[in-house]
Amino acid sequence: MNPPAHRPQAAIIPVLLTLLLALAGLVLVPLTGTAATNLVTNGSFETGTTSGWSCPAGTVSGSARTGSYALQATPSGSNIARCSQSIPVQPNTAYTLSAWVKGSNVYLGVDGGPSTWTISSTWSQLTVPFTTGDSATSVTIYLHGWYGLPAYQADDVVLDGPGGTADTTPSTPGGLTVGSPTSSSLQLNWSAASDANGIDHYDVVRGRRPHRTSAP
């Protein structure tokens, strides 16, 4: 009778050594997705300032729709109290701009594109859908009132869509370690990368060849 077949333990050791040595060539690549997200900086004005906006006639008010602060801008006889922000976008892409506003003749729009307006004594949402052009890399969104009318307020300004090429490159993940090795796999652990628009997934790369895609 032949002895029972089994795999010698010694055969596992070279496999583990090979896998461990292969780690030296692994690189973790954090990638951001193109999922829709709010591209407006300080769109809820919760910084307590108008940072991120060009808004000479604007300030913040404690009378907010949500949170603690909202934009408040006061027109004059010669000024519509325009507040604007330039945002990187992608060409030939659909976006939706929205904001909650309150006041007389409050406008929301995109330079060179569509706009809308309302008169409302309570918080009312304005929405402006648009599609960027073939060579668009940025858009300027704006809010404004009208000459000589009382102050208007705005809160929760959102530009919904994928970010443009000016997005921050994700930071490099660190602390790559190996845990729980088996004869056919290795458990990889690392500290998370960071990015203003969020990490969509990681690619584990050896040389130029991707080995595995992982969720955050």
Image (cartoon, rainbow, N blue to C red):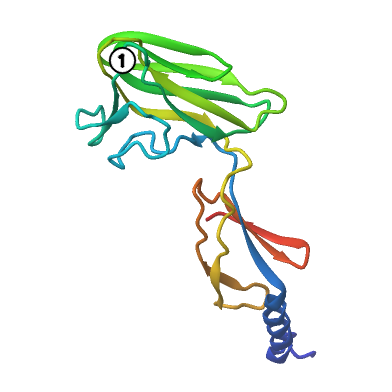
Q: Which residue is mark 1?
A: 76
Secondary structure beneath dot 1 equals loop
Note whether 95 is above or below 165 in the view shown.
above
Horizontal side, residue 156 vs residue 90: left or right: left
Depth check: 20 or 61 in front?
A: 61
* Quarter of the view holding residue 33: top right
Toward the front, the furthest residue is: 78
User: x and y percent of residue 130 in the render?
Assistant: 57, 19
Horizontal side, residue 80 vs residue 92: left or right: left
Depth check: 26 or 69 in front?
A: 69
The residue depicted at 73 percent of the width and 87 percent of the height is 14
User: x and y percent of residue 213 in the render?
Assistant: 64, 56
Depth check: 1 or 186 in front?
A: 186
Horizontal side, residue 77 vs residue 109: left or right: left
Note whether 171 is above or below 107 in the view shown.
below
The residue depicted at 38 percent of the width and 29 percent of the height is 55
* Quarter of the view holding residue 69: top left
Instruction: Residue type at mark 1: give it.
Output: Ser
Mark 1, Cα crowd under 10 Å, few <14 / some 14-19 / many 20+, is some
User: x and y percent of residue 163 in the render?
Assistant: 57, 38
User: x and y percent of residue 132 in the render?
Assistant: 63, 23
Q: Quadrant of the N terminus?
A: bottom right
Horizontal side, residue 37 vs residue 60: left or right: right
Note whether 17 is above or below 143 in the view shown.
below
